[in-house]
Amino acid sequence: MQIFGLLYNFLMGLTMLTKLTTPNKSMMLKLSSMFAALTFSMSVAYAAGPAEVFKPDLAKGNEIMQQCVACHGADGNASAPIYPKIAGQHAEYLYKQLSNFKAGKNGEKPLRENAIMAAFAAGLSDEDMKNVSAYLASQKQTLSAAKNKDTLALGEKIYRGGIADKKIPACAGCHSPTGSGIPAQYPRLGGQHAQYTESQLVAFRDGVRNNSEQMSVIAAKMSDKEMKAVSDYIAGLR
């Protein structure tokens, strides 16, 4: 089922990309190769029969989480706005991010560059990452609020309607009207620290974070004012 989920995500991402930009020959060749690899993986998985379902150990996840409390808080609700709240985040998304912080097998740069997280993720096994992700997903996120009344209308407009003249789609289309996201596909955004959300949009725009082509394309078209406005609005979603 995981392979089918990946294929679904690929097709959703392809649809979004074609709305945002005109694919060139190089991009189409790359997408064709990715699609071929996914369909091959599906055939292999089908032939091998059903995979064993992983059952997370929340106690072990909690134990691993104790290494994270200095930045993310005891229950995953970071108090400092430069760090993300990860309590209540979808386990699939957290697992993907931990995996992306790791360097490649041949020393390739990680898809997400962060010295602190890279050092932490390097010591985690695949099972560790799944356990701590499941534990954090089981925790309850604390609420935040939008703080800048002057940009609230702009933030709401971008989140719910996008920016038509820049071909930027509504954030709500993927992250849901309440900011709860879609498990296994798109992360929860509602209630996140505005400063952290804004920093990630900047990272996508500047190429520091490269693990979502959709977000890289979107962020590249946004101004600083637009990023700040939508980030503040998102903080108040629930």
Image: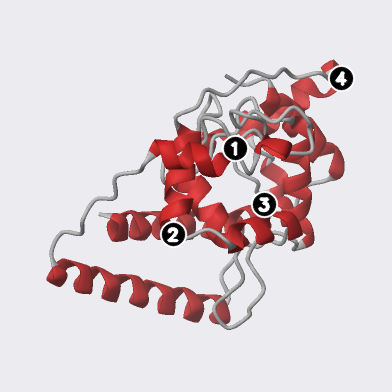
**Mark nearer the N terminus (4 vs 2):** 2
| Mark 1 or 2, closer to the camera | 2
Quadrant of the image containing the N terminus: bottom left
Q: Amino acid at mark 2?
A: Asp
Question: Which residue is located at x 60 percent, y 32 percent?
Answer: 76
**Mark nearer the N terminus (3 vs 1):** 1
**Mark nearer the N terminus (1 vs 4):** 4
**Where in the figure is residue 8, as x and y percent of width and height?**
35, 55
Look at the picture and state if 52 lies above or below 222: below
**Which residue corresponds to mark 1?**
171
Distance from disc 3 to disc 1, alpha carbons, whole Å, reads 10 Å
In screen coordinates, is 200 left or right of 180? right
**Mark nearer the N terminus (3 vs 2):** 2
Question: Which residue is located at x 71 percent, y 62 percent?
Answer: 113
| Mark 4 or 2, closer to the camera | 2
Q: Amino acid at mark 3?
A: Ile
What secondary structure is found at the residue carrying circle 4? helix
What secondary structure is found at the residue carrying circle 1? loop
**Which residue corresponds to mark 2?**
126
> Which mark is on residue 150?
4
Distance from disc 1 to disc 2, alpha carbons, whole Å, reads 31 Å
**Which residue corresponds to mark 3?**
218
Q: Is residue 8 visible?
A: yes
**Mark nearer the N terminus (3 vs 4):** 4
Q: Amino acid at mark 1?
A: Cys
Q: Amino acid at mark 4?
A: Asp
Question: Which residue is located at x 62 percent, y 60 percent?
Answer: 101
